[in-house]
């Protein structure tokens, strides 16, 4: 069932170029399905607030998150990191 849902999203997805003109959509870039959305408090000029999320099947979620956080250069900085913790 999930595969059918992904296929329907792919069928309706915009191109990368088309996605630039809308605040919320699904689009395909380099063969990857991506969800784009802008928070309600973000203006059109605040492109840096726009979120782009790769869409994957639920069965691959843990594997992808594992790879993204377990390799030495992976992960992300915490939002509340103190400058004293940065070397």
Image (tube, rainbow, N blue to C red):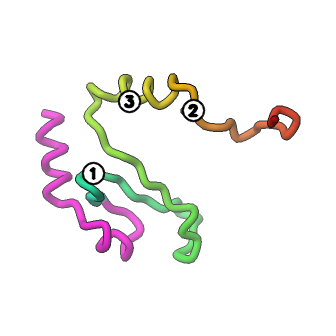
Q: Residue at x 35, y 29 (%)?
A: 61
> Does residue 1 lie above or below 50 as drawn?
above
Q: Residue at x 52, y 27 (%)?
A: 69
Q: Position of residue 5 (x, y in %)?
A: 17, 43
The quarter of the picture where residue 26 lies is bottom left
Q: Which residue is mark 1?
A: 33
Magenta stretch encompasses residue 24: yes
Q: Residue at x 35, y 53 (%)?
A: 35
Q: Toward the viewer: 2 or 65?
A: 65
Q: Is residue 9 left or right of residue 44?
A: left
Q: Main secondary structure of the magenta part?
A: helix
Q: Which residue is mark 3?
A: 64
Q: Which residues are magenta?
A: 1-25
Determine whether label 2 and label 1 are within 8 Å by CB.
no
Determine whether label 3 and label 1 are within 8 Å by CB.
no
Determine crowd level at label 3: few under 14, some 14-19, many 20+ residues with C-alpha closer than 10 A: few
Q: CA distance from mark 2 to mark 1?
A: 25 Å
Q: Dot 3 lies on which element? A: helix
Q: CA distance from mark 3 to mark 2?
A: 15 Å
Q: Position of residue 6 (x, y in %)?
A: 19, 44
Q: Toward the viewer: 9 or 63?
A: 63
Q: Which residue is mark 2?
A: 73
Q: Dot 2 lies on which element? A: loop
**Is tag 3's residue or tag 1's residue first in the polypeptide sequence?**
1
Q: Toward the viewer: 76 or 38?
A: 76
Query: Quadrant where the N terminus lies?
Result: top left
Magenta stretch encompasses residue 6: yes
Determine whether label 3 and label 2 are within 8 Å by CB.
no
Q: Dot 1 lies on which element? A: strand
Q: Position of residue 7 (x, y in %)?
A: 13, 47
């Amino acid at each position: 069932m999930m595969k059918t849902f992904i296929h329907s999203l792919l069928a309706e997805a915009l191109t990368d170029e088309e996605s630039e003109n809308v605040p919320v959509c699904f689009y395909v870039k380099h063969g990857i399905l991506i969800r784009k959305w802008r928070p309600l408090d973000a203006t059109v000029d605040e492109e840096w607030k726009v979120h782009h999320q790769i869409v994957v099947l639920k069965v691959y979620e843990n594997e992808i998150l594992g790879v993204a956080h377990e390799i030495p250069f992976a992960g992300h900085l915490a939002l509340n990191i103190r400058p004293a913790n940065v070397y």
